[in-house]
């Protein structure tokens, strides 16, 4: 190793997707290897801003989920004089992209490290991967503002503080899941935002629906097979070589009396005074904040999906990563509750509202995305950035058939088109607006989900969701996912 974590290497070659090299400083003459799907970029140092160095740096990330958080990520930074053309064509960058360079009075750059996202690896990833990687391309400017979240309000407070900057544009690199994005888009002002905001997401959450859907064409091969390529590698490639695109959003509004609810670890006093038996049993307290509307980029739902998100978001379940959804799903499927609500939809280019027949629903969900998790394809027709909202709905079909529909969603979205002999079916269609009027007595079934945030709506109240034409946010994507302009 040399300074800055660089390893000088020679004899770099590629064969069948495997890169081999020799370590110049090593006494033995062993060949080392890494898969080319682990490569983040190949930096052409002669093009980099300092311009005084020749040669290349090949960067790659190797992850081992079996290892402890401290040893989980291994970043390779290989300095070499020559690189095979095949690698240069695919991965070459000439330096730090302009959107990552702070320019006083013109452009701000922030990194938000959301410490409680996913299973809590963001900080480790920042320290052992992103920071050294960034510094290998260009000195990490002291003007890059790094925010390590301290509590659940950190991202929203940051978003609120943005109004005081005089710069025209800002890039925010988010080491988080969908919650970090939703906190950011809801924290600031949507009325004439004065700064062009570009979001770059490194998927360190649990579901990472936004990231997974925007990168789907890069991990699904032409034949539909899923490529075993790391989401974090894809995220880093996009971060250092991406383009900005308009982020499609929707607007969800709630009636007076609606509250954002979430479980928090309870203090002793809260435990003894709580009248919520479920919360007390789990040593949790409910935090509640009044809310009238939220913007979303991921999902709005009522029924099985929102209950699943709500009831699995406890500190106890969170430690299980994405397995928490399966654990709580079992319980909900056993109960197989029929959610009592009226659901109305408005299709694109129609001014008429249609009421979905029947007042018992298991699943009501609309989304601009294809995937809620990388392997859970809820809306197979959705393409990255297409700006369309799609509805997935089914009535009270019972736990077994709900389970079947969910398993088919895990099988590439095969739940779409499902029909049963008793007339039930999975509805799947494009909509511009949705209204859900909640008719339930029991508060447990009053929860709607907006991008993972849970809102408790009073009985008889209505959730309204519509497309937001002017989002005001840009998102960093790979050029290959940009919609084709004909
Ligand atoms: N130090 C902290 N203490 C308490 N809450 C935090 C802290 N840091 C971040 N948070 C909150 O934790 C939430 C993490 O949500 P996020 O969506 O990023 O992860 P996730 O829920 O695991 O992933 P996904 O939404 O993709 O399934 C955010 O709402 C964030 O505000």
Image: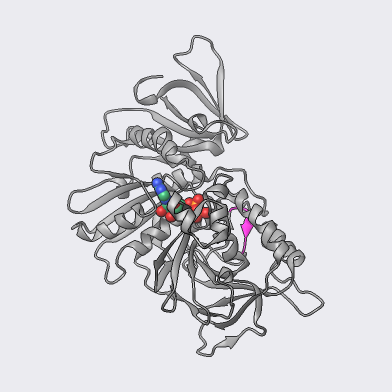
Q: Is residue 481 above or below residue 44?
A: below
Say which residue appears at 40% left-offset and 72% top-offset.
293
Q: Does the rendering let one see residue 242?
A: no
Q: Which residues are magenta?
A: 374-379
How far across and how far down the image is residue 369, in percent?
53, 64
Left/right placement of residue 436 relative to residue 363 reads left
How far across and how far down the image is residue 388, in percent?
51, 72
Q: Is residue 378 magenta?
A: yes
Q: Is residue 403 above or below residue 337?
A: above
Q: Residue furthest top?
A: 27
Which one is nearer the viewer's eye here, 83 or 197? 197
How far across and how far down the image is residue 218, in percent?
55, 51
Would you say the magenta stretch is mainly helix, strand or loop?
loop
Q: Is residue 196 above or below residue 173?
A: below
Q: Residue furthest right?
A: 421
Image mark count: 0
Say which residue appears at 57% left-offset and 76% top-offset.
430
How far across and how far down the image is residue 361, in percent?
65, 75
Which one is nearer the viewer's eye here, 172 or 316? 316
Say which residue appears at 41% left-offset and 69% top-offset.
294
Q: Does the rendering let one see residue 255?
A: yes
Q: Is residue 91 magenta?
A: no
Q: Quadrant of residue 355?
A: bottom right
Left/right placement of residue 385 relative to residue 409 reads left
- Quadrant (top left/top right/bottom left/bottom right) for the N terminus: top left
Q: Is residue 368 above or below residue 102?
A: below
Left/right placement of residue 308 relative to residue 128 reads right
Q: Residue furthest bottom?
A: 352
Q: Residue furthest front?
A: 272
Which one is nearer the viewer's eye here, 55 or 255? 255
């Amino acid at each position: 190793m040399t300074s800055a974590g660089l390893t000088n290497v020679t004899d770099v070659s590629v064969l069948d997707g495997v890169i081999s090299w020799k370590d110049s400083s090593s006494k033995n003459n062993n060949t080392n290897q890494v898969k080319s799907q682990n490569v983040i970029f190949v930096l052409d140092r002669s093009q980099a801003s300092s311009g005084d160095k020749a040669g290349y740096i090949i960067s790659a990330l190797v992850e081992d989920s079996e290892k402890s958080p401290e040893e989980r990520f291994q970043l390779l930074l290989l300095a070499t004089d020559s690189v095979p053309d095949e690698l240069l064509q695919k991965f070459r960058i000439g330096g730090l992209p302009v959107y990552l360079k702070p320019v006083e009075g013109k452009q701000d750059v922030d990194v938000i490290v959301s410490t409680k996202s996913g299973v809590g690896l963001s900080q480790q990833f920042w320290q052992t991967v992103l920071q050294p990687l960034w510094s290998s391309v260009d000195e990490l400017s002291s003007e890059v503002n790094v925010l390590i979240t301290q509590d659940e309000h950190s991202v929203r407070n940051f978003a609120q503080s943005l109004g005081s900057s005089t710069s025209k544009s800002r890039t925010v690199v988010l080491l988080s899941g969908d919650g970090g994005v939703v906190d950011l888009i809801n924290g600031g002002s949507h009325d004439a935002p004065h700064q062009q905001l570009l979001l770059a997401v490194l998927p360190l959450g649990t579901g990472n629906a936004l990231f997974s859907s925007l990168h789907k064409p890069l991990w699904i091969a032409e034949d539909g097979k899923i490529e075993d390529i790391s989401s974090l590698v894809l995220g880093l490639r996009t971060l250092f070589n991406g383009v900005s695109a308009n982020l499609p959003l929707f607007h969800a509004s709630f009636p007076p009396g609606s509250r954002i609810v979430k479980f928090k670890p309870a203090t002793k006093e809260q435990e003894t005074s709580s009248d919520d038996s479920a919360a007390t049993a789990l040593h949790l307290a409910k935090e509640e904040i009044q809310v009238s509307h939220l913007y979303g980029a991921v999902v709005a739902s009522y029924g099985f999906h929102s209950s699943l998100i709500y009831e699995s978001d406890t500190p106890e379940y969170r430690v299980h990563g994405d397995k928490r959804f399966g654990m709580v799903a079992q319980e909900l499927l056993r109960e197989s509750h029929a959610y009592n609500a009226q659901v109305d939809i408005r299709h694109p280019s129609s001014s008429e509202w249609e009421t979905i027949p029947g007042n018992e629903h298991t699943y009501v969900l609309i989304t601009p995305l294809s995937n809620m998790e990388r392997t859970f394809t809820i809306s197979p027709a959705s393409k990255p950035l297409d700006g369309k909202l799609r509805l997935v709905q089914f009535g009270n079909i019972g736990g077994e058939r709900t389970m079947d529909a969910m398993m088919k969603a895990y099988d590439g979205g095969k739940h779409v088109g499902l029909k049963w002999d008793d007339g039930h079916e999975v509805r799947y269609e494009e909509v511009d607006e949705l209204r859900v009027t909640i008719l339930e007595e029991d508060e447990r079934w009053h929860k709607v989900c907006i991008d993972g945030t849970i809102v408790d709506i009073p009985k008889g109240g209505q959730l309204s969701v519509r497309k937001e034409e002017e989002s005001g946010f840009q998102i960093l994507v790979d050029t290959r996912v940009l919609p084709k302009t004909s």
